[in-house]
Image (cartoon, grey):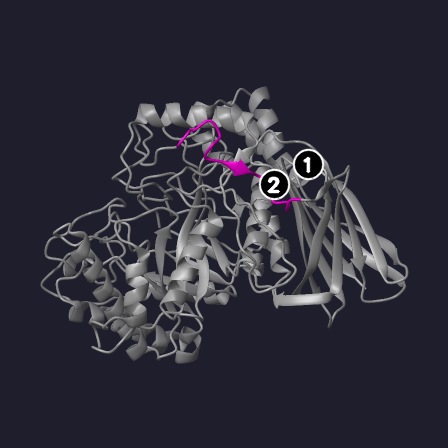
Amino acid sequence: MDRIFLYKKTTATLLILTILISAFLSACRTTDGGELSGSVDTVYESKTIVLDNTNSSDVVSDDSVSSAEDNTSKPATSSKDTVSEEKPTSNIDIVITGGSAYQSDNTDPDGIALSEKNTFTVNTKSTGKTVTSFFNNMNMWSVNAPSKDSQYDVYDFVDYVQLMQCSGGTADRDLFKDPLNKSVLDDYDFTKLINVCRTIVKNGAKPHLKLGSVPLKYSTNVAMGDFNMNIYPPDDYNVYYDYIYALAAALVDEFGRGEVLSWRFGVMTEYENDGWFMHPSGDPEETKIAYFKLYDYTVQALIDAVGDTIFVGAHSMSCTEGMRDEADFIEHVAQGTNYATGNKGTRICYLAASYYQHVAGAGVGKNEKNFIQTMSYLQQTAKKYGLNDLIYGVDEGRMLTGINTGRTSFDLNNRMVGYSYQGAFDARLFKQAVENNIGYFSSWMFLSKGRPTVSYYVAKYSSEFAGMKQVSTVKQTTSSRDADIQAISAYDPATKTLRIMAYNFKNSYEYSDKATVSFGIDAPIQSGNVSVTKRFIDDNCNYFDEWLQDRKTYNITDDMFHWSPDDPGIEVFLEAADDELADIYYKTLMPRYIEASKLTPQTETLKVSAGKLNIEDTIDGNSVVFYEIKF
């Protein structure tokens, strides 16, 4: 699930110094990285999109603090560039160039007039592509299902649960009765994985099984990689084929062929990351061929056991260079000789990348790709080799590190920050994804001990756009050249429902400037009263601002956290709290945070006149608003 970036390792001291400089500059500058994206498949999307995000390595090992929604999972970075118990490390150089490596946050096309308001025209009669649910995937590092909460149920919008590296690589993950007995290669025991899949299906989602790593007993020489997992290929690919075939057949026996065909499968995590997969020789070319074989034999085993319409694909880093160019793999599955069958090509249904912003609030370094660059590289390469019908998504990502460090690391345990900034960041990802044909984004968590984060609300309400038709949303004026104030709309003619999402984002925690958003809507009716529901996602439905204030009141210092205290999983400080402070937290603070997390919709009746409806609101800096208009 994590990835390594093949840049020179820095020391712990250099990491701390670099990130502190980056944090300072990010508070001073108003820009971040990106390039312009071209128009895609619709005539009314934004004329230009300037992107922001940085990317970097990812999460999780069995030695770190557990995720709030994955209690037995212990996310960490790689051992090659590990965040250890003693000191934080990094394998990415954050490039500080006085601003020249960054571009403006603002996505407004040239020529948009400055005004006190950000005005948009929305035309419900000008429909385009069908919008899909974007934040509908969730990662689980441990082989467990996300919990089902009675009040804030992630299964309301999570369609797929990704079980990362769920079929091997450690004695705990290898699906055998005796994983360490190399004299017996077929003592399969798939009970644990079947039970987790049963829970996921019962809760209303589908498993996405990331198959790998190779079981310990299948490699004569085992090398434990960056996540304490076997990175070597199998000695005998036919033996590995038998293993995957038996696993898939067991799933069919348990759930039925039709059900399993509705699931998703992947072959390894970040296949060009040498911390996940490596030939014993260490040679890049031999490693490339070894992964081609692993993919081909795995896919053929799935086809033979389940059916030739199995949904399967591969997950690369892509946001930065790995050991091999993804284009080599894409060319192989499109045009190369299948090592398992001898035929041309191998079945592939999706290509996924990892996408992380390295430091929340900072920009994209010169050696990294932003969000659209990351995904468009996969899209364009696939089309180059004749793969025109693939789904593209992010199999893991969001934020890597905070701006403040805990005792040992800047890392964000749940790969997100608690600030309302995160909600506006997510909203912009959603808009960019719709306008660039990016199908999904898989996240590590949405709830913190049952409390909704701002990311939960953005995921939940953006999922309500799914199945609707995107409609023309054109920005006419802007109130800021520094911030990104944008909107996206979709309409369902069957229910006469219009949805609008607007956000006021700047890549800075300190950004607090309010923005007025005004919508002139060409309505589907000529006159009459309409119901408008507004949901504002800001500090009023976020417990984290109260938490920050309480930290000052009760002297809850950064060193009471293992990793970055900017993470929304705040209870980890209790491991360093005395009994009196713990008692205060559970009796006084937690009940307040539960209340502070609640979002209360605002509903009003507005009038359509001569086919026009006008809506206007002022929203906070780094906040989001969702409108639901029933005509």
Location of residue 460 in the rendering, given as x and y in whole percent from the top left corner? 61, 54
| Circles 2, 1 touching at the beta carbon (< 8 Å) | yes
Crowding at label 1, few (<14), some or many (≥20) Cα neighbours within 10 Å? some
106 in the magenta segment: yes
Q: Name the one closer to the observer, 180 or 306.
A: 306
Residue 106, label in figure = 2
Find residue 89 and report its image quarter.
Answer: top left
Location of residue 53 in the rendering, given as x and y in whole percent from the top left corner? 49, 43
Find residue 629 and report its image quarter.
Answer: bottom right
Horizontally, is 52 left or right of 396 in the view?
right
Location of residue 249 in the rendering, given as x and y in whole percent from the top left corner? 30, 76
Q: Secondary structure at mark 1?
A: loop
Q: Name the one closer to the observer, 162 or 428.
A: 428
Looking at the image, is mark 2 or mark 1 earlier in the sequence? 2
Horizontally, is 504 left or right of 281 in the view?
right
Q: What range of the chain is rendered magenta?
A: 95-110
Q: Above or below — where is 544 with respect to 383? A: above
Q: Quadrant of the C terminus?
A: bottom right
Disc 2 residue type (three-letter)? Asn
Location of residue 137 in the rendering, given as x and y in whole percent from the top left corner? 48, 58
